[in-house]
Structure formats: structure tokens, C-alpha cells
Amino acid sequence: MKELWTSMASLMAVWAFSRTFLTTVFPPELLFAFTKLFQRLFNCFSSYCYYDITEIEGVNTNELYTAVQLYLSATAASSCSATSSNRLSLTRGLNSSAITFALSHSDRLIDEFNGVSVVWEHIVIPRQSQTFSWRPLPEEKRGFTLRINKRDKPYILEPYLEFINIKANEIRRKNEDRLLHTNSRGSLDSRGHPWESVPFKHPSTFDTLAMDPVKKAEIMSDLRDFADGQAFYTRTGRAWKRGYLLYGPPGTGKSSMIAAMANFLKYDIYDLELTEVQTNLELRKLLMKTSSKSIIVIEDIDCSLNLTNRKENAGAGDRGSFGLFDGAPDVETGGNNNSVTLSGLLNFTDGLWSCCGSERIFVFTTNHIEKLDPALLRSGRMDMHVFMSYCNFPSLKILLKNYLGCTPEDVGTEMLRRLEEVTCAAEMTPADVSEVLIKNRRDKDKALRELVEVLSIRAEKNRNGLRRIEAEEVAEEEEKREVESLKEGGAAAGGGHLAEETWKTTRG
Ligand SMILES: Nc1ncnc2c1ncn2[C@@H]1O[C@H](COP(=O)(O)OP(=O)(O)OP(=O)(O)O)[C@@H](O)[C@H]1O
Ligand SMILES: [Mg+2]
């Protein structure tokens, strides 16, 4: 034993000496070239292929890396013995409800696919300090290396990666961990991502959403078609994205509808705060960092964007028409780049950049559709315009069911008739109706009585308001008529005077 240790020590000493000798005698470039050559020689004789999957690819997060991470996490969890060490790191991310098993640095995992063994290795290396970078990058470079036997590669690589993607999507859906991302000015997280994320756990669903059932079914079927439409979008040469414009008075459920959409499709939400974005270029970077299967939301678009920018920036020619050259003056030609313009935004929703990423839904909301630039409303720009209206009778029945657990039978025919009479005329938002119901939810009868009362008062007020407006209009009309007739009388008198004058002149 003692001899063994002595020879080990001698070997280490020789190794240390040779290293020092080599680094002193040969310049580092030569050593690097030598190492590369050695690697190539090794690769020629090796019977394996190696594939690197890095976390960040160019400017984008590599979605394959995330997929592999999820897949290996599940594999590592199910068979700890497949890993090179008995130690796995367990994490539960801030935004996740699931425990993740992760390989630590240089850990290996043996996986099997279609009877073929492959080896995964997780590589983490410190990033060299950069002199300049247009965006801060994580301090460490992370990546997976996949080792496959050369003879297995032709028939295993593609199906294996496809299988990993499918599995990762399944795991994602199972965890149902969806995120709500938001941006704030100039803030980047430790990994250089411009979005801050929190778990998205909004309880709104299409079941709880009070709106016309026919319209609701139409929207749900549209969303379903979109999510299942990959083949359709590819076949028709369209970018796989869809735009919805939700408009209506405050409290009619626009934000609730967005949450319901996300819960229905199990998509993440990117809540884009446009007022925090300073330039079109920044906007482009933010949108490039959104993942697929997500809803990109811009609330109150009329307040977020200076819509006059477009007209000011449009300049000559057809730039204002948002064709192929949308946004071109802002970035490509180095034109006005100091603000976010509608043109810059639309370039992502339906311009050239719309194909960047896939399976994305854009939702814009506004309380004042009349304030929006007609270019935004033009057909084909936003695929669906959804008017979120005041509470009508079908919506009211949904709210009664949600808040009081009452079916129409429970409410009774007489009460239903009274509610139906006043609901539309009251022009109350679902938010206002909900307030009355929440307050009295413990006493259904009281809730219904108060609801009828409130609705009736509002309906009466509206009718009075309407009567007053009508009366004002009638008075205005009468006043106009009087002025007209006075003018006519004056003109007739003036005309007579003129005729008299003319006659006098002629005679004179
Ligand atoms: N159609 C609806 N169905 C169910 N609940 C609704 C509906 N509309 C409003 N509510 C209730 O009212 C509250 C406010 O609704 P929400 O924030 O979705 O309105 P909004 O249209 O987005 O308003 P704003 O224009 O002010 O943003 C929600 O918490 C929700 O409970
Ligand atoms: Mg809202």
C-alpha cells in the first residue's frame, strides 16, 4: 500500500512538472492549437459523436436546452442509478410547484432510447469576462453534451430529440406551471432575461366568465383551432400567431378573459408594459425573448402608446401603411429610434418579425376603441375583435351561478322576469353586479332582492338620463327651427327692401 502511494505521488509530481514545463516553453496559442489537433485526432479514432446543447444560442434562450433539462430531470428522478454520481441536486424554483432533479457540473446520465444507450453530460463553465456585450449574459455557460455511438446516430438522433421535446411538453403540461412575465425598465435578471416572472395562478376560466354563451363558444373554438393549427399555418404559409382586440368599458372582464384564455390553453402570459419600453429596438429584444405557447398582452393600448408617433414617423410614401417596410425607418435604416411606435409594434404582430417564435397570441385591450389608430383596426390586423359589454341577462345568469350557486330554477320565474326586465337597461358592468352578489353571498334572497333594486335604480336613472337627453335634443331642434324661421323672415324683409332699392335705382 505504501508503495502504491509513493508511485502515485511520483506520477503527480511528473505531471505537474511536465505541465509547468510545457506552459513555460510553449506559448499558449501553440498549446491551444496542439490540444485542438489532439482532439481532432481523438475524434477521428473515437467511435462516438458528441452534440453540444448550450443554454443560450446567439441572442435567444435555446428551447432545446430547456426541454432536455426537463426531460433529464424526470429521467434522473426515476432512476438515480443511471447517473454517474449518487448525488442529484433538488430544486423547487420560485416559479414552480414541482421539484426538479438536476445534474450538477460534469455529472453524467445514461439514457436508453429504442434499445440504444446514450450518455448525457452537464457542463457548467465560468464565462470569461467580456469587454463588451449588448446585454449582460449569465456568469456561467451551461450546456448538455450528448454522446451517441457513431453507428447508432443515423437512425436515433432525430427521433430521440423529437421524443425529448414531446416528453418535455408533457411534463410542462403536467406540472401546469405557467408563468406571468412582466418587464420593467432596464431590469435584467441574473441570467440576463429582460422579463421578471411569477407563477400564474389566476382562477378565471371560461366557465366563470360572464358573457354571451354564443360569443364565448366562438372564442373557445377559435382558440382551440389556433392551438391545434400548426399544420394549417405551415400549409398556408402564415406565421403561427393570432391577435385579439378586447374592448369595452372598465370592469366588463377584459383582463379576466385574458386569464381565462391562458388557463384554457395552458399558455404563459407576457404582460408587456409598453410605457417601460423606450425604443423599438428594446421592444424587439423583449419580444424575441418570449417563449412559444404564450399570450403577449398589452393592456390599455390607447394609453400605452403615443399613436401619433406613427403618423409623425410615417413621413413620405407608404410607410404609414405597415407593409413589408413597417418599422424599417426605426431600426434598419437608423432612422428615428428614440420611441416605441405603433409601426414597431405591428411589425411583430404581423410584419416580418411575426414569424420570430411560434404559437403566440397577441391580446390588446382598450376602453376606447374609437381612440385607436385605424391601422390597428384594419381587417386582418387583429384577427378577432371582441366587445366586452355591460352585463346582459345571459351573463347575469352565469354570475348568479358563480356567486350564489343559483340555477334559474332556484331563482324562480317571477324574480327572473324582473331581473330580465331591468338588466340591459341598467347598463351595469359584471364587476358592479359581482360586488352586489359578493356582499350578500351568504343570503341568496337578500342578494337577489338587492340586485333587482340596484338594477332598477340604474335602469330608471338611465331612462331619466335618456329622457333628459331627448328633451334637450327636442329643445335644441326647436331652437334651431326658430332661428331658421327668423332668418327666413329677415331675409324676406331684407329681400323686399332690396327690391325696393333696386326699383328706386332703376327709376332714378
Ligand atoms: N365578464 C365577467 N365575468 C366574470 N367576472 C367579471 C367579468 N367582468 C368583470 N368581472 C369581475 O370584475 C373584476 C374586474 O374585471 P376585469 O379586471 O376583468 O375588467 P376589465 O374589463 O379588465 O377592466 P379594465 O378595463 O378596468 O381593465 C374581476 O375581478 C372579475 O371578478
Ligand atoms: Mg383590465
Image: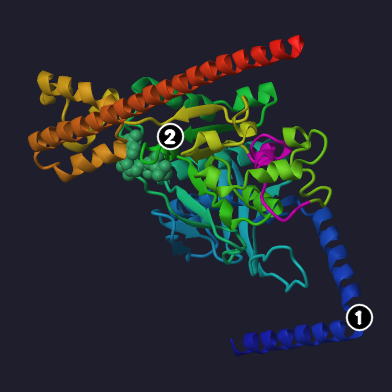
Q: Can the viewer see residue 234?
A: yes
Is residue 206 shown left or right of residue 29? Answer: left
The circle drawn on residue 248 is 2
The circle drawn on residue 503 is none
- Is 418 part of what is drawn in magenta? no
Residue 395 in picture, x, y percent from top left: 29, 28
Label 1 near label 2: C-beta < 8 Å? no
For the record, the magenta segment spans 336-357
Amino acid type at mark 2: Gly
Looking at the rendered image, the disc whose residue lies closer to the viewer, 2 or 1, is 2
Residue matched to label 1: 26
Quadrant of the drawing holding the N terminus: bottom right
Going from the N terminus, do you reach mark 2 or mark 1 first? 1
Name which residue lies at 82% across and 34% down.
Answer: 317
Report the front residue among 323 and 132. 323
Circle 2 crowding by C-alpha within 10 Å: few under 14, some 14–19, many from 20: some
Is residue 269 shown left or right of residue 161? Answer: left
Report the front residue among 49 and 129. 129
Circle 1 crowding by C-alpha within 10 Å: few under 14, some 14–19, many from 20: few
Residue 349 sits above or below residue 141 on the image: above
Coloring basis for residues: rainbow
Quadrant of the drawing holding the C terminus: top right
- Ligand 2 appears in which quadrant? top left
Name which residue lies at 34% across and 22% down.
Answer: 213
Ligand 1 neighbours mark 2 (CB distance < 8 Å): yes
Amino acid type at mark 1: Phe
Residue 289 sits above or below residue 348 on the image: below
Residue 456 in picture, x, y percent from top left: 19, 30
